[in-house]
């Protein structure tokens, strides 16, 4: 269970993953937007710087150009690109130049390669493209080349004096600082995003635990209910008024009610047991008491007339009959106790021993007795118990038939079960008696003890079997006992 | 942003005017005399050392008993115009403006600095130290930097050289320009903005010592004959007493410990007395050059960035 709490599974994991995914998605999207905007903003800033520088040089240039004061032109170009104002300190100026309308260098920061009075040295297509493009510029413009660390842009500004084009200023700023700046902010944003994702994961885990903890507790509770361990259900802590809280409190109420119900049922069962015990006791007392009264009466009479042989002759059989009846009752009760302890097994053919007993029980009455044993020799049964069940059921049917009728005994195997069927075409059982059929001392017969079917019921139950009765008044009765074959050996 | 740029620009453009006014402001505090002696300067002396000039002005004021202020101008033409108009009393000019004809004459030789024992200096033709050029002939079709159109060493001498060769002075170089400052001429060559330049030997040697990072990048390929060192002059309108007083103070600097410090700072031996004939070879050179090329029309205004030059 502790493992479950540490590593969320199932719903908890899904919750955590979903929240993490959502947070990550949002954070990365926002991060990407910020980085893009940042890059655009930085680029715009750089463009403005380039334009400003080019424009500044272009503003001071006309006089110098008109007076062929190239040295001052060069100095102002150099100073303006060197003394970058505050806030532009991180601008990396690659080069700068002032060209005349014919593209001839009037001033160039790279003096060594670009001497005054000659076209600037431009090697490669890119430089040629920029050179050509810059010569066509008639109002301040930005020319770009490449992207990333080695890319750059040029602020190009034409130099006019009295609407006459005197030249063109080109100031080339590197993307390097811009790139590094963007990279730095990208790192920060990625870091923040990762932190947010981590935070989101933790939050997700916390929320999912918060949500699934009561669910897990409820699951455990329900499992306990399934196992019947009602007393083990601990109330789930209800920490909120939300749906989960309501669910938890409902579950708690249900569990409490189930515990109460179980307690109540147990109490009912106990009292029912007491009732049953009382009924048995009363039955035994009643059944024993009935003959006892007659016996006492006989003995009293014999005491008064000890020498009357006629009385002795008349009362002795009565005494004998009464004592036999008590003996039968006690025997029946004892049989049940004995058989419950009997574990001997034997072949199913041992049932056939019962045929003769049943025939003698019929005792010449007009009753057809059909014996139909389909169990093979290899089927082992609990001999004593099954014999008692079959005998009791057959006796019950024969007694119910009275003087005439048919009794069929049939037994067969069905899958893992042994089926015993006793069918008669007697008067049937009236519905009001059906519920009491297997109660002890319940009998509708004159001399019945009311223990036969009770013993059958107890034996079937002890073998985890099922007994079913189908009966219709006037159309006979069928008892069907289904016993699991695996229980036979016990 | 734009404002700071503008500020930079102003500072850069009106440097000399600002310096002049600051010098003036300080002296109005030191002495209450309303009419200071105005001493004109160009970039002949090393122009970066503002504090040096302040201290020297203070020294001269002390010695003169009245305020002296240095008035800086970009070109010799401006200084000459100011002398002529009377707005300067003294000036440190160049031999070339000194020998030019003036009618009526309005300046008089005051003193000639003594450099390395003689009141003489040279014009150097310099190139970048890595340059393949060995003579001024090799510089044909290249860029060339002059200092000031009225500078002897920085303009007249190279012009004279070209005139002597009989070449078309205009077509000889691809591009020429003026820096109006010998030290910037050296800088232009050091940065390879100019392929060659003419420069004052005194300034070049001074820079060799104090700004070797620039001067060491240059190499001398031609040295002129000795010329009279750029002289100090007085305006003729200034009262003789002040002129004599100034002359005494200037000449006595070599014997005065404080004056010695300023001379040391300028790398000069002394301010001496010389005859105007010291500059005769410059006059002769100017005549020979001018005979082959009429001088252009130089116009100047006090606060313009560059003097309009038609080449």
Image (cartoon, coloured by chain):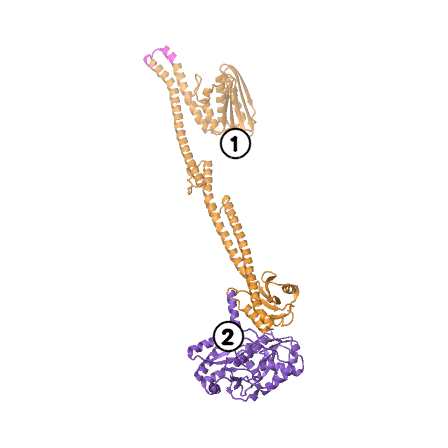
Q: Which chain's colour is purple? A: B
Q: Percent position (x, y) of residue A129?
A: 65, 63
Residue on which the image places disc 1: A486
Residue on which the image places disc 2: B17
User: Residue A222, which numbered label?
Assistant: none
Element at label 2: helix
Q: Is residue B78 magenta?
A: no
Q: Identify the colour of chain A in the image.
A: orange
Residue B85 appears anywhere in the view: yes
Q: Give the answer, above or below, for where A273 lies relative to A256.
A: above
- Is A471 situated left or right of A70 in this image? left
**Residue toward you, A257 or B42:** B42
Numbered circles on residues, count: 2
Same chain for mark 2 and mark 1? The answer is no
User: Which image quadrant is residue A130 in?
Assistant: bottom right
Region rendered in magenta: A302-315
Whole-angstrom CA distance, mark 2 to mark 1, is: 125 Å
């Amino acid at each position: 269970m502790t493992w479950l709490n540490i590593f969320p599974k199932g719903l908890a994991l899904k919750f955590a993953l979903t929240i993490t995914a959502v947070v990550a998605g949002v954070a990365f999207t926002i991060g990407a937007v910020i980085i893009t905007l940042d890059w655009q903003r930085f680029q715009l800033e750089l463009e403005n710087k380039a334009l400003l520088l080019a424009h500044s040089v272009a503003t001071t240039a006309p006089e110098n150009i008109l007076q062929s004061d190239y040295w001052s032109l060069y100095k102002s170009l150099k100073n303006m690109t060197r003394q970058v104002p505050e806030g532009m300190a991180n601008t990396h100026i690659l080069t700068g130049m002032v060209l005349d309308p014919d593209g001839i260098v009037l001033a160039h920061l790279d003096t060594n390669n670009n001497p005054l009075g000659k076209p600037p040295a431009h090697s490669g297509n890119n430089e040629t493209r920029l050179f050509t493009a810059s010569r066509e510029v008639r109002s301040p413009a930005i020319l770009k080349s490449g992207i990333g660390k080695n890319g750059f842009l040029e602020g190009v500004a034409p130099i006019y004096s009295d609407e006459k084009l005197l030249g063109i200023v080109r100031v080339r700023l590197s993307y390097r600082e811009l790139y590094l700046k963007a990279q730095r902010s990208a790192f920060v944003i990625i870091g923040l995003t990762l932190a947010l994702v981590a935070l989101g994961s933790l939050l997700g885990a916390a929320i999912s635990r918060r949500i699934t903890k009561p669910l897990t507790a409820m699951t455990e509770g329900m499992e306990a209910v399934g196992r019947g361990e009602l007393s083990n259900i601990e109330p789930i802590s209800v920490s909120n008024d939300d749906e989960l809280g309501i669910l938890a409190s409902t579950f708690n109420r249900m569990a409490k009610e189930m515990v109460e119900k179980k307690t109540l049922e147990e109490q009912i069962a106990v009292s029912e047991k007491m009732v049953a015990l009382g009924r048995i006791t009363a039955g035994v007392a009643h059944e024993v008491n009935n003959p006892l009264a007659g016996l006492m009466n006989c003995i009293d009479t014999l005491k008064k007339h000890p020498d009357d042989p006629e009385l002795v002759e008349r009362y002795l059989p009565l005494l004998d009959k009464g004592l036999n009846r008590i003996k039968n009752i006690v025997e029946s009760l004892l049989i049940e106790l004995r058989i419950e302890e009997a574990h001997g097994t034997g072949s199913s053919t041992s049932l056939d021993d019962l045929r003769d007993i049943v025939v003698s029980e019929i005792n010449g009455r007009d009753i057809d007795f059909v014996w139909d044993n389909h169990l093979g020799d290899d089927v082992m049964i609990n001999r004593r118990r099954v014999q008692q069940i079959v005998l009791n059921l057959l006796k019950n049917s024969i007694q119910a038939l009275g003087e005439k009728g048919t009794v069929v005994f049939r037994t067969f195997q069905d899958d893992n079960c042994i089926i015993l069927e006793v069918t008669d075409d007697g008067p049937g059982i009236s519905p009001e008696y059906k519920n009491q059929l297997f109660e002890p001392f319940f009998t509708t017969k004159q001399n019945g003890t009311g223990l036969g079917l009770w013993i059958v019921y107890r034996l079937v139950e002890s073998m985890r079997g099922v007994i079913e009765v189908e009966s219709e008044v006037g159309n006979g009765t069928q008892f069907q006992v289904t016993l699991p074959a695996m229980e036979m050996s016990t | 942003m734009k404002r700071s740029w503008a500020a930079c620009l102003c500072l850069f453009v009106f440097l000399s005017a600002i310096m002049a006014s600051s010098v003036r402001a300080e002296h109005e505090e030191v002495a209450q005399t309303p009419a200071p002696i105005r001493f004109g300067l160009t970039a002949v002396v090393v122009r970066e050392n503002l504090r040096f000039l302040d201290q020297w002005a203070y020294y001269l004021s002390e010695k003169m008993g009245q305020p002296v202020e240095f008035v800086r101008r970009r070109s010799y033409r401006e200084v000459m115009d100011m002398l002529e108009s009377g707005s300067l009393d003294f000036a440190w000019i160049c031999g070339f403006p000194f020998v030019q004809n003036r009618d009526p004459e309005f300046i008089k030789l005051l003193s000639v600095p003594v450099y390395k024992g003689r009141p003489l200096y040279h014009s150097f033709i310099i190139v970048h130290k890595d340059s393949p050029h060995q003579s001024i002939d090799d510089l044909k079709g290249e860029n060339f930097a002059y200092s000031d159109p009225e500078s002897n060493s920085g303009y007249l001498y190279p012009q004279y050289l070209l005139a002597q060769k009989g070449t078309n002075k205009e077509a000889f170089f691809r591009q020429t320009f003026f820096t109006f400052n010998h030290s910037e001429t050296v800088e232009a060559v050091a940065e390879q903005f100019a392929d060659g330049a003419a420069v004052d030997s005194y300034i070049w040697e001074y820079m060799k010592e104090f700004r070797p990072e620039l001067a060491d990048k240059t190499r001398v390929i031609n040295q002129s004959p000795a010329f009279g060192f750029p002289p100090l002059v007085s305006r003729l309108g200034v009262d003789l007493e002040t002129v004599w007083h100034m002359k005494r103070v200037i000449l006595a600097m070599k014997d005065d410990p404080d004056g010695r410090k300023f001379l040391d700072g300028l790398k000069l031996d002394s301010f001496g007395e010389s005859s105007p004939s010291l500059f005769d070879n410059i006059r002769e050179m100017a005549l020979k050059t001018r005979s082959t090329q009429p001088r252009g029309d130089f116009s100047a205004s006090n606060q313009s960035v560059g003097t309009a030059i038609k080449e």
